[in-house]
Structures are given as C-alpha cells and as structure tokens.
Image (cartoon, rainbow, N blue to C red):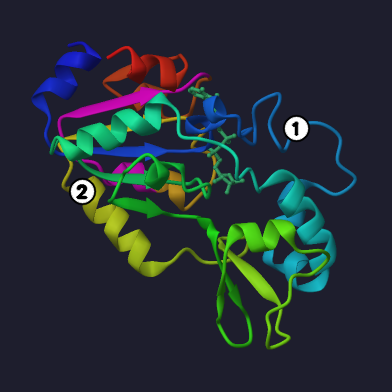
C-alpha cells in the first residue's frame, strides 16, 4: 500500500515529530552532522540544556539558549502546512511534537501536544508572570521579571519531568489513532520516544532522512526529506 493510499483511507491520523520536521524551515536538528549537538563544544550541549546547569550557571545557559535555540524568524514549511490541512479536513486528530519552535501552530494546527514545551512560553520563577520569546531574545544576561525574579523558558530541560496533561493528551491521541506518522526524529530521547509504542492502529509510517531504531517496526519506511515527501502528496 502506498503512503497516499494509507492517508486516503485514514481519518484519525496522529503525527509524531521531532527536530527533522523543522530543518527545512532553517532550524538545525540536534544529532545530524550539522546538528546542534555535533561540532566542538567546551561543555556538551546536553549538559547546558539541563535543569542543574540552568539553575547553577544561568547566564551561560542563556548565552547558549539565545544563540542556538531561538530561531524566531523561521517559517513553517510544507510539512507543517500539510498537517494543518489534514486537521482542517478532519483526517488528522493531533500532532505530538518534541519541538519547541511553535511552527505547527504557526501553520494553523490546533491540536498540538508539545512534549518538550515551547520557547514561546516563558515565566517568572517568583511571580509566574508570562514573557514572550522575543522578550528573552532581546534581553541581556539573565532575563529578569519586573518583580526581580528570574525568567525561565517553559521548555523541558534534561532532568525535568514532562507535563502530565500533555503526556495524557498525546498518549490518548496515539492510542485512538488509525494511522501513526512518525517523522523527523531519531527516536533517541525518552520518555518521548517510547510513546509511539502506544499505537495500536492499522498504518504505521516512518519518514526520516536517517535510519532509526524503530524502522523495522513500521509498515512503511521512507528515507527522505519530510517537506518534500508530504509536499508531493
Ligand atoms: N526530513 C526528514 N528527516 C530529517 C530531516 C528532514 N528534512 N532533517 C533531519 N531529519 C532527521 C535526521 O535524520 C534525524 O534522524 O531528523 C532526525 C532528527 O533527530 P534529532 O536531531 O535527534 O532530533 P529529535 O529526535 O527531535 O531529538 C529529540 O532530543 O535533545 C533533545 O529535546 C531535544 O526534542 C529533542 C530530543
């Protein structure tokens, strides 16, 4: 069965995506050769993006975070648009993403489960006042609230738990899907990567440039560029 045929006969599609969904929007992924984690770093990025580092070396965290994690000029690509189109057509019931860039919502997707949070939500640790990603990008050093408290991005850092309601929503969607489309992810970070195992429906498809540990469990595997594959449907 072709991808087109599977999509044609499915009306409860769930999309499960990662950083590879946004590379065609100009946002580097993490583990590809040109990813954020590759190349020379004095401190491993996974250490910088941890809760311990955020609370103990906040200024250095923000230096890395502003430079590497805030790509606010990026626009949704053909993949984001196609998913929003399927949702409008009543074929897709949810997007589960590990990305924090908000591009699915910018493309018009309504039902988005952001497992690792979003750069667009930032809050004061003291009074909980909310701030925009632009405020963080344009601030210097450690961004401070008007009350003097430190502002933290609402993104899941290494060592932090995922949001319970988001997990519940994502797992429920995957469990009730008739088709699971996994794309642009190395499926190497847990618990997120483990959620695909809740799928019990008919069609499981994986579209990823590189191989993943889950390739052999999917009905169809396409090694290609997601924006191109979905754009050509
Ligand atoms: N089309 C299809 N696949 C792509 C594309 C593309 N245009 N660009 C990259 N890829 C694939 C790569 O081959 C790679 O396997 O996307 C995958 C991206 O994998 P990672 O860089 O590991 O990103 P991701 O799986 O989202 O990482 C999960 O790790 O550091 C944490 O919190 C961070 O959410 C992130 C998590």
In front: 123, or 131? Answer: 131
* Side (left or right) of 138 relative to 95: right
Does 197 lie within the magenta span?
yes
Ligand 1, by image quadrant, is top right
The residue sitting at 52% across, 50% down in the picture is: 100
- Asked if residue 109 is among those painted magenta in the image, a careful observer would answer no
> Residue 170: horizontal and vertical position, in percent?
31, 53
Q: Is residue 158 visible?
A: no
Q: Residue at x 53, y 20 (%)?
A: 210
How packed mark 2 is, by other alpha carbons closer than 10 Å (few <14, some 14-19, many 20 or more), is some
Name the residue at 68% across, 88% down: 147
| Quadrant location, the C terminus | top left
Which mark, residue 78?
Answer: none
Q: Which residue is mark 1?
A: 38
Quarter location, residue 199: top left
Q: Which residues are magenta?
A: 195-209
How crowded pointer 1 is (Cα within 10 Å; few <14, some 14-19, many 20+) is rated as: some
Mark 1 C-beta closer than 8 Å to ligand 1: no
Residue 67 appears left or right of 106: right
Give the percent coordinates (x, y) of residue 159.
62, 64
Is 211 rendered above or below residue 88?
A: above
Q: Secondary structure at mark 1?
A: loop
Residue occupied by mark 2: 175
Asked which secondary structure carries label 2, the reply is helix
Residue 79 visible in the picture: yes
Above or below — where is 12 with respect to 23?
A: below
Q: Splitting the image into 4 quarters, where does residue 231 fall?
A: top left
Say which of 65 and 165 sits in front. Answer: 65
Reply above or below: 193 against 33: below
Q: Which of the two discs, 2 and 1, labels the residue nearer the N terminus?
A: 1
């Amino acid at each position: 069965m072709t991808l087109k045929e599977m999509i044609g006969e499915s009306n409860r599609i769930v999309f499960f995506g990662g950083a590879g969904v946004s590379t065609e929007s100009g946002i580097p992924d993490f583990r590809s050769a040109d990813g954020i984690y590759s190349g020379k770093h004095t401190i491993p990025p996974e250490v910088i993006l941890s809760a311990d580092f955020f609370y103990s070396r906040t200024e250095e965290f923000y230096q890395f975070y502003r430079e590497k994690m805030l790509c606010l000029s990026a626009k949704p690509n053909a993949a984001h648009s196609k998913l929003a189109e399927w949702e409008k057509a009543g074929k897709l019931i949810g997007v589960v993403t590990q990305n924090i860039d908000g591009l699915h919502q910018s493309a018009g997707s309504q039902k988005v489960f952001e497992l690792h949070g979003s750069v667009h939500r930032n809050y004061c640790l003291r009074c909980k006042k909310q701030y925009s990603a632009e405020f963080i990008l344009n601030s210097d050093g450690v961004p401070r609230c008007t009350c003097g408290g430190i502002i933290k991005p609402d993104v899941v850092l290494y060592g932090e738990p995922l949001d319970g309601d988001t997990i519940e929503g994502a797992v429920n969607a995957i469990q009730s899907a008739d088709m699971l489309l996994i794309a642009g992810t190395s499926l190497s970070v847990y618990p997120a990567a483990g959620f695909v195992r809740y799928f019990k429906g008919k069609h499981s498809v994986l579209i990823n440039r590189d191989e993943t540990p889950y390739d052999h469990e999917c009905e169809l595997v396409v090694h290609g560029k997601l924006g191109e594959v979905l754009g050509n449907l």
